[in-house]
Image: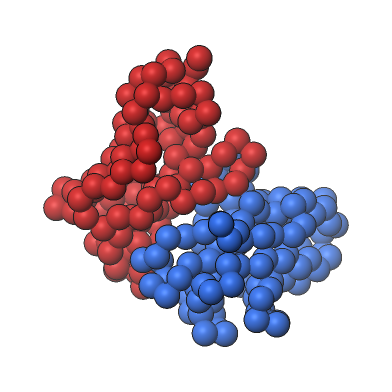
Chain colours: A red, B blue
Amino acid sequence: KNEVEQSPQNLTAQEGEFITINCSYSVGISALHWLQQHPGGGIVSLFMLSSGKKKHGRLIATINIQEKHSSLHITASHPRDSAVYICAAINMDSNYQLIWGAGTKLIIKP
Amino acid sequence: EPEVTQTPSHQVTQMGQEVILRCVPISNHLYFYWYRQILGQKVEFLVSFYNNEISEKSEIFDDQFSVERPDGSNFTLKIRSTKLEDSAMYFCASSGDRGLNSPLHFGNGTRLTVT
């Protein structure tokens, strides 16, 4: 079983839809990163959070430490949001290393 | 905004050759990392570097790999004798004084192709 699981693996939606990507983890973590990987391969950090909720523009990330679950939401989605979204958890049980999820491939159609 | 820069963007090499992948982290960052992503697979951790030494390394980071920070700005990954299975995208990242508990900044990656 993967220590960090993301769902869905693939998501296709229409422009304007509200998007939710989920991340569950089975280990103790100190914080969790949400990252965006562009079609060209580059990786951009979106959020790092250890509790509660963070918002940046149309992106919102939440984390529930007790339930070992985090979500990334995109409001008013746009085709330029099309990318792979990856969660990566800082594993307290393994020398605070990052454990990467497999990513969610998001396609937003105009 | 400061960026992590990686060169080259694409490197093609023959099996058995040595390659050096270069990275310039953000200047006031203290933690440096190399990750790799084989096509179609998850990102994998290779090594982290702090205070001029390796702080953690994965099983992938065997004797064929080494890292250096030769001049206080560059951070290099050397693969001594490349294998076909080393073909991947290699990402350098850096972070501030709280390590992984700080935002991570990634370079655009070097695509290594071993033929």
The answer to whether residue B39 is visible is: yes
Q: Is residue B89 left or right of residue A79?
A: right
Q: Is residue A62 above or below residue B100?
A: above
Q: Residue at x 69, y 59 (%)?
A: B6
Residue B77 % position (x, y): 68, 69
Residue A34 % position (x, y): 39, 48
Q: Residue at x 21, y 55 (%)?
A: A51
Q: Residue furthest bottom?
A: B52
Q: Is residue B12 left or right of residue B26?
A: right
Q: Is residue A95 above or below residue A24?
A: below
Q: Is residue A96 left or right of residue A68?
A: right
Query: How many numbered circles are shown?
Result: 0
Q: Quadrant of the N terminus of chain B?
A: bottom right
Residue A100 % position (x, y): 43, 52
The answer to whether residue B85 is visible is: no
Q: Residue furthest left?
A: A66
Q: Residue furthest front?
A: B1
Q: Residue at x 79, y 54 (%)?
A: B11
Residue B67 % position (x, y): 65, 75
Q: Residue at x 44, y 18 (%)?
A: A15
* A41 or A80: nearer the viewer: A80
